[in-house]
Image: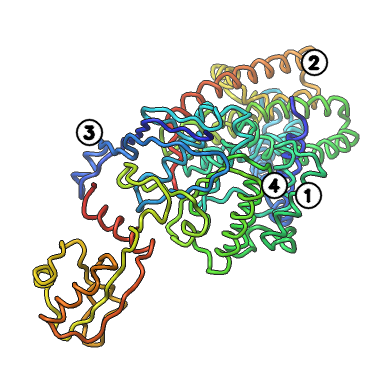
Amino acid sequence: MKLQWRLAALKNGFQDATAYRVEFLFEILGSALVPAAIQWVLWYALFQLGGATQVAGMSYMDLIHYTFVSLLFSQVRGGDHDFELAEMIRSGQLSNYLLRPVGVVEFVYIRGVASRLFIAGLCLTLGVILAQFLGFSGPRMIGAMFLALLGNIIHYQVGAALATTAFLWEEAYSLLMVKNMVVNLLSGELIPLNLFPPSLQWIWKSTPFYLFVFGPTQYALGHWSHTEFFTQVGIALVWIGLGRALIRGTWGLGMKRYLSLGG
Amino acid sequence: MNIEVKNIRRSFRSTKKEEGWRGTFGLLLRPKYQEHEALKDVSFSIEPGSFNGLIGANGAGKTTLLKILSGLIPPSSGSARVLGYDPFQRSLDFRRKIALVMGQKAQLWWDLPARDAFDLLRAIYEIPNKVYQERLHTLTELLDVQRLLGTQIRRLSLGERMKMELIGAIIHWPSVIFLDEPTIGLDVLAAHKLREFLKVFNHREKATIILTSHNMDDIERLCSRVLILRSGALIYDGHPQGLIQEGERILRVRFINSPSIEDLQKATGLPAQLIQLGDSEAEDSDGTRPILFSIKQDQIVSVLQSVINRFPILDMGIEEQSLEKVIQRIYSEEKAGPA
């Protein structure tokens, strides 16, 4: 495994993401504040206006804690490098990368994940500080961030596999938009997944998306045991293996149809 | 041989849409397909270290051929070998030894300075730092862009950007370089600088280069060999000057009363394809254009005598045949219909 180009790609990706510092900061703040505000309004309506004392076994403070901590992990799961890959295939820009002696899917991921790693570092620091105030465990926060980073890999793999539909179909962009909406719902980014009706819990349990935000938050807040956490890390690694195989398959099929359009 | 191409064919299938709503629904429900043959049985081989021009009108198949040779797409049939590799296998070794520059496709990152992009390429190609610094110095000096290395790509002019693209494409010192219209959109000075650079690089590094361009200056000044594609078929493979028949001249005559081509044909006994109406740029204020006779030097006197005897002339001149004119004629024949 050649480390040199991977490190250089990370550096390059970070330089690219932060070329416009204000835009970069606004993107982080915007994507954090909007879901937080939605959740706060929802909990306020339920508990203060609706008079509820508990929802799915969680108090008002439990849900506020969930909101704060889940924000840290939802910042890590994102990234639009799967969109970038789809656009490269559609426009023919992929040709520029195919002739370089590196794997295109991995190269795009590493460049795209650079800014997320930086954000993960910031969120981890914030999380450890937050843990002191809210009485959580710092080491749990580190483990949870590790799981969130595995979730980031899975998220890209799902996106990259969908992006390869651009080899056949010009509308891969809309497919990725739908994927993002499903992820928003099933990752626990908008609401804790244990608020799902019991008969529908199987839906989020059968996708890897809960590993992106809900899982790390559960572990950080102490709702998962260490055993449960390591089991989930194992599940995440299995999903990564499956994702890798899926991309290999779809990429191989797609390349046979690639026309390198434009020029 | 560095490049061997044997009986390559490549066809593309695309949907065909008819006009209006009927066409829109037809495309949705029962799409009709059409097959387009972009390359037809093309064969040639190329010597190491040579500088070759690949020309043809738009849609003649030049870029498709470069895409096949660089391994981006496979041929429908036939075979290609570049440096002994099957290009479409895109082995790591093969990718380390070639470069493709497309004048219309940016390879560098828009928001980053060129130096950052080159640093990444250094890591990708595992170029030792000392060698990299030397190459970067040589390339930026030859192309006169040293002072721009720290400027964001998007803030550079088209010519400066193209020079940076070229540096990015060849910083790994490839053995084979495919250049697809590298001087497109450049002003005369920038195009000249780029040409000079390519000439020096080819001479110094003995890299095999295939260049496509619509600028005949590029071809004439750089290429020792030219391949012409017409509607996907290779119709000429040889020295650029071979296109201009030895001793061929253009006799330009401006008549007082413009005679028809048929009348001139009868008067001179020349076939119609050797008598052409001049460019509109050479048109008189009264709308008359000169007539151009493509003839051998020893025919000049007899042709001139035969036209002077029949038609009063205003002025005349003798010009050397140019590559540009010959290519123009080949392109216009393509528009009229494939050979």
- At mark 1, the secondary structure is helix
Amino acid type assigned to the residue bearing label 4 in the image = Leu
In the picture of the structure, the residue carrying the numbered disc 2 is A225
Crowding near the residue tagged with mark 4, few <14, some 14–19, many ≥20 C-alpha atoms within 10 Å: few
User: Is there one chain holding both mark 2 and mark 4?
Assistant: yes
A57 displayed left or right of A202: right
Q: Is residue A60 visible?
A: no
Q: Residue at x 78, y 23 (%)?
A: A219
Residue A233 x %, y % = 73, 18
User: Is there one chain holding both mark 2 and mark 3?
Assistant: no
- At mark 3, the secondary structure is loop
Residue B72 x %, y % = 49, 35
In the picture of the structure, the residue carrying the numbered disc 4 is A33
**Upstream in the sequence, badge 2 or badge 4?**
4
User: Is there one chain holding both mark 1 and mark 3?
Assistant: yes
Amino acid type assigned to the residue bearing label 2 in the image = Ser
Q: Mark 1 belongs to which subunit?
A: B
User: Is there one chain holding both mark 4 and mark 3?
Assistant: no
Q: Mark 2 belongs to which subunit?
A: A
Indicate which label's residue lies in the foreground, 4 or 3: 3
Picture quarter with the N terminus of chain A: top right
In the picture of the structure, the residue carrying the numbered disc 1 is B134
The answer to whether A146 is drawn above or below residue A49 in the figure is above
